[in-house]
Image (cartoon, rainbow, N blue to C red):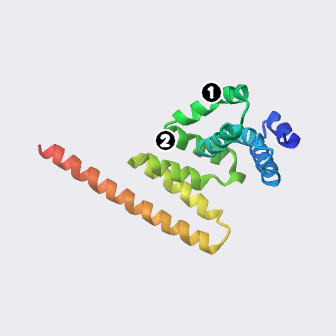
Amino acid sequence: MNVKGADLFKKGDFLAAAQAFEKAYALDSRDFRVLRYAGRAWQEIGFFERAQTLLERYYGLETDAKAKETLLPSLEKLRSATPRAKAEALEAAAKKYPEARLEDEAAKAWETVGDLPSLRRALPLWEVARLGAPDEAKKQRLDEQMQRLRDRIAAQEKADAAAESAKQAA
């Protein structure tokens, strides 16, 4: 196991721990157990999708039945998380860990929820992601994403207004 990652995790520095565990795995993929620790760190951060991906990968590689059994509660919690819970956790993580630049992931998660209030929550997250974009090409892609979202919001508002008018007319 990666000692640096473990120390960081124990100190509550989950982002640095996740990064250390992932780096350790990139350097030596035979040490697949660090995937478990990276996944748990991402779960603590609130990036449930990434946590689940890493923990599922670890679960598939682990041969020790007891180790797999102890992981199941964490995996079940991640598997059963609603899209709204995932979006809320990611938005909170983006605020708590600005250096992780999770705004785009949080925006995508809110768009997945799909209702009008959620779409409105996604837009400022995309705007923050754009501010942190590393280059003009990425900024352009984010501008296009935000325009698509604005169009989607306008269409949803129009549809809601029409439905309300029809309801009042009936």
Q: Nearer the viewer, residue 78 or 116?
A: 78
Q: Which residue is pictured at 79% across the width and 45% down the height?
A: 21
Q: Which residue is denoted by mark 1 in the rendering? A: 73
Q: Is residue 153 left or right of residue 110?
A: left
Quadrant that contains the C terminus: top left
Q: Nearer the viewer, residue 85 or 128?
A: 85
Q: Nearer the viewer, residue 20 or 95?
A: 20
Placement of 120 over or under 138, stated as above or below: above
Q: Residue furthest bottom?
A: 136
Q: Give the Cα separation between the discs numbered 1 and 2.
A: 19 Å
Q: Which residue is denoted by mark 2 in the rendering? A: 83
Q: Which residue is pictured at 53% across the width and 55% down the height?
A: 124
Q: Which residue is pictured at 49% across the width and 41% down the height?
A: 83
Residue 168 appears in which quarter of the rendering? Answer: top left
Badge 1 or badge 2: first in the primary sequence: 1
Q: Which structural element holds mark 1?
A: helix
* Residue type, mark 1 in image: Pro
**Whole-percent x, y for residue 167 in the image:** 17, 44
Q: Residues within 10 Å of mark 2 (few under 14, many from 20)?
A: some
Q: Nearer the viewer, residue 101 or 20?
A: 20
Placement of 83 over or under 142, stated as above or below: above
* Residue type, mark 2 in image: Pro
**Whole-percent x, y for residue 25 in the image:** 78, 49
**Whole-percent x, y for residue 98 in the image:** 69, 51
**Whole-percent x, y for residue 4 in the image:** 87, 43
